Amino acid sequence: MTPTEGGRQRSRVEALEQAVTGHITHALARNVTAAKPRDFYLATAWSARDRLAKYWAATQDAYRREGTKRVYYLSLEFLMGRMLGNALLNLGIEDPMGVALEELGVQLEELQELEPDAALGNGGLGRLAACYLDSMATQGIPGYGYGIRYEFGMFRQRIEDGWQKEMPENWLADLNPWQLVRPDRTYTVQFFGRVTSSVDADGRQHFQWVGTQDVLAVACDYPVPGYRNRTVNTLRLWTARATEEFDLSYFIRSDYSAALQAKIQSEAISKVLYPPDDTSAGKELRLKQQHFFVSATLQDLIRRHQADGQTLGNLPERAQIQMNDTHPALAVPELMRLLMDEHGFEWDAAWHIVTGTLAYTNHTVLPEALETWSIDLLGRLLPRHLDIIREIDRRFRQLVETSFPDEPERVERMGIVGNGVVRMAHLAIVGSHMVNGVAELHGRIIRERVFADFHDLWPDRFTHVTNGVTPRRWIMKANPGQTALMNSRLGDDWACDLERLRELAPAADDAEFREHWREVKHWNKVALAEIIRRETGEAVDPVTMMFDVQVKRMHEYKRQLLNALRVADLYLRLRDDREMDVLPRAVIFGGKAAPTYQVAKRIIRLITALGQVCNNDRRVKDKLQVIFLPDYRVSLAERIFPGSDLSEQISTAGYEASGTGNMKFALNGALTIGTLDGATVEIAERVGRDNIFLFGLTAEQVEAKKREGYRPWEYAEASPRLKRVLEFLISGDLPPHDPDTYRPLVDDLLSRDPYLLLADFDAYLEAQDRVDAVYRDPEEWTRRAIINVASCGYFSSDRSVRDYAERIWRL
Ligand code: D6G
């Protein structure tokens, strides 16, 4: 550092110190000497926000002035995680802030731990939304996230007697330093009521939605800083407020609870995130949430468009709306309604605007997750929308009939309204100009299978954009050790041009670099081991044990159960022969099960039971430990990926649309054992088949097996090891020592096994043996890990967002 640089650094530190102490004194009215860590956290966050605020206002002004097209990312879920570390990193003031706080006698690291995760999402879909916001801001794209500010986010998971227990997550219990409440952006959202019509002097029919129950949507803004580019975008989340604080007539009669009833009902809308994972939660409140956030968002963006001096006719040139799954699909009828009923457009002109503006991302091929709403419910809650949907359906069916004459079954299959329900995916496809899958394979599956009829009609409407993750949070922030090592080779400007990781490939053959690489991994494993000890009381050895990790939502198709069966097999073999020469492993699991998903909860119980038997058997323990890390969430994930050796991506081929955990592992130097599913296919293509452990049936083979009639019991008959494992599960040997606890799992595997665990079991064991062999050669393992990182630059969400911009948003 030159003397001038040193001087500049000094003055930055001093300015930050002043900012922090200033907030403690003025905003918290507290003496700095009496300040607690929580006060320092708030003051630090406010200091960061002050700096963001300046850029925030300037960015929004520039968007207005320059009139560039805006992108609206509508999502019921945003899994943002913690914001402080990210804000400091992106502002480029991490180091001086660290020094400033140190001089004030506190550690930045510790303050960061005080921030509750903003967990307004269930899993991959919500985290993807967060990564895309980061990437849009980093690339200077005028992107806006729109969703709901749930008072209670994703539940906190505890393990009690081995079972999952859900606790409410009150992330707003304390002051939230990031949010900017914007009462000046409040909209009325209507529900229920009825539709009347009138004819004007020109003979045009007009519809009025009357007698409605209204709820107010109040904006709450969160800054989304780009990486060191002075751009700050907005995440705008809506809170529900009652139109009248309370009904005064009841209040006067001292009936307080009746007086508050309406308020409670209205405000329930933004109370809690649904944790349905990917099954459709057939709940009225969920539908209310969807309409609530869609309506407020559309009103807001129309207002902004008009405030820019534009007429609505050119909305598609100035605004693109990306629907993250079908949860925002009511945007189709709601935008039609706003354009026709509120802004006087005719049907055709309105439809042109709607389809020019909207695009839809599909995230799942599970049939049970394709959202539908009963006509009764939708018609009661949103009568005008149902009318509009029926009219869209009528016109659409006509089009299909003309395009495919004499194929009435096809028309029926493609209908938006049918069998008493509205099919939201069909509504979203018909109302969009583009529909995309989230990985290459998934794109193909929706074109050829799930939405084949639609693809026949509109081949050009379908595309795919492979998911990505932000390297700022998932490499730089999560893994400072690896970042520093990479900087030593690449300089420090690879994070916004991740394809540059390629230049790391030659380092894989550099023994000294590999040595450093192993050191970094070692310390990351030490840190993870410490978390494991704190959270579970178990001591895992980062030196002798491979950390073999599967973290993600608990779901049958993700096959945590297959992993558990393999663990059980290893345990049984070790019990027979304790001298057996196997690679010592800590098999680590993390993930939440939807509270009503009994099978998934039973699988968690099985994993914790395996932990009880392995970790308490002194002679097995050195070779096999099983850990279930409770409360998997973004901030925990940031510690897990860097500390992992092996990434388990073992879903049934054809079921995982993309996955993003697979990318985070690979970019943090873990090798993957996996099936050819989702984006793992593309990881394999890039890292090369020698640098990944693939096994199991392909998507085509899975389909073929199902077509031919899959008989899982034959696999159990044919594989003695598999048979023994299944018998072990119902032997009563496993805690809680009741043979019936795991019997439903075993019965289902032997009779239906819809996700083909038994068919892939032997291949999985064989692949794990290959893992063992390579891990025993640390030089080779490290070489492959470096190659993995060097080959995965493609999986930056910056690239994904560029693909969206080009193929879908036409920016
Ligand atoms: C954010 C930041 C603030 C800006 C505002 C614009 O709250 O600086 O003025 O967004 O909001 P709209 O006027 O676009 O709704």
Image (cartoon, rainbow, N blue to C red):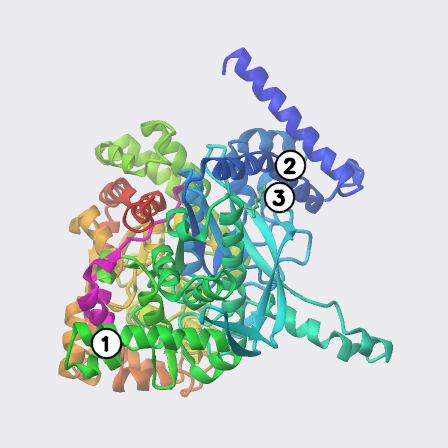
Q: Which amino acid does the dot numbered 1 rest on?
A: Leu
Tell me which secondary structure the magenta stretch mostly adopts.
helix
Q: Position of residue 690 (x, y in %)?
A: 16, 49
Residue stretch rendered in magenta on the structure: 444-471
Q: Which mark is residue 758?
A: 1
Element type at mark 1: helix
Three-letter amino acid code of the residue under disc 3: Leu
Residue 399 lies in what quarter of the image? bottom left
Choose mark 3 or mark 2, whichever is in front: 2
Amino acid type at mark 2:
Ser
Q: N-terminal of the two: label 3 or label 2?
A: 2
Left or right relative to 773: residue 339: right
Mark 2 lies within 8 Å of ligand 1 (Cβ measured): no
Which label sits on residue 47?
A: 2
Residue occupying the point 60% across, 24% down: 12
* Residue at the image position 31 percent from the left and 84 percent from the top: 748
The single residue placed furthest to the top in the displayed view is: 3
- Where disc 2 sits, the SS reads helix
Question: Residue visible at 31% across and 86% down?
Answer: 747
